[in-house]
Image (cartoon, rainbow, N blue to C red):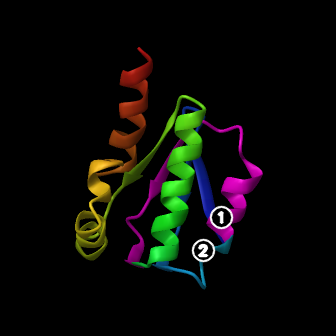
Amino acid sequence: MLNVTKITDIPILHPQGRFEAYTIGPVRNWLDQNQEVANIVVDLSGVTFLDSTALATLVQGMKHCRQLQGNLHLAGLQPSVKLIIELTRLDKAFGIYPDVTTAVSAFEHVHN
């Protein structure tokens, strides 16, 4: 099950544990069912592992948000997850923030 919260109308997705092919379903389903949402934060503070399927899903979500003139930000990366993001050079593509509040604030600065 995927926990989703909101801050100032921006959805925050909270995947937990291993974020991989076997557990990606709820995140992928949420993205598929909310295609009108332009700005999303994915809180990775509870994620201990990412695989290529999770990375591809995040990239796909980011591309969709950008088509809507928005973006997908990542927040709260654990050291092991941050290393995977850096090794794949996706740190150059995503907005990466230390916490959810900072990630949401980054959207507000873009729109003001």
Residue 44: % across, % down = 41, 64
**Which SS class for mark 1?**
helix
Whole-Å distance between the Cαs marked 2 and 1?
A: 6 Å
Q: In the rendered image, which residue does mark 2 sit on?
A: 24
Vertical position of residue 19 compared to residue 102: above or below: below
Q: Left of 47 or right of it: where is 53?
A: right
Near mark 1 (Cα within 10 A), the count class, few <14, some 14-19 or many ≥20, is some
- Residue at 50 percent of width and 65 percent of height: 56
Figure quadrant of the C terminus: top left
Numbered tag placed on residue 19 in the rendering:
none
Q: Amino acid at mark 2?
A: Ile
Res. 26 image quadrant: bottom right
For the N terminus, give its image quadrant: bottom right
> Is residue 56 one of those drawn in magenta?
no
* Residue at screen point 51% across, 80% down: 20
Question: Which residue in the structure is indicated by mark 1?
Answer: 28
Please say if the residues under marks 2 and 1 sit with CB atoms less than 8 Å apart: yes
- Residue 36 in the magenta stretch? The answer is yes
Identified by mark 1, the residue type is Arg
Residue 90, position in %: x, y?
32, 58
Q: Position of residue 45 (x, y in %)?
A: 37, 65
Magenta-highlighted residues: 26-49
Q: Is residue 16 visible?
A: no
Rendering coords of residue 38 (x, y %): 59, 36
Q: Which residue is at 26% across, 66% downward?
A: 82
Most foreground residue, 72 or 11: 72
- Relative to 50, does residue 62 appear above or below in the rendering? above
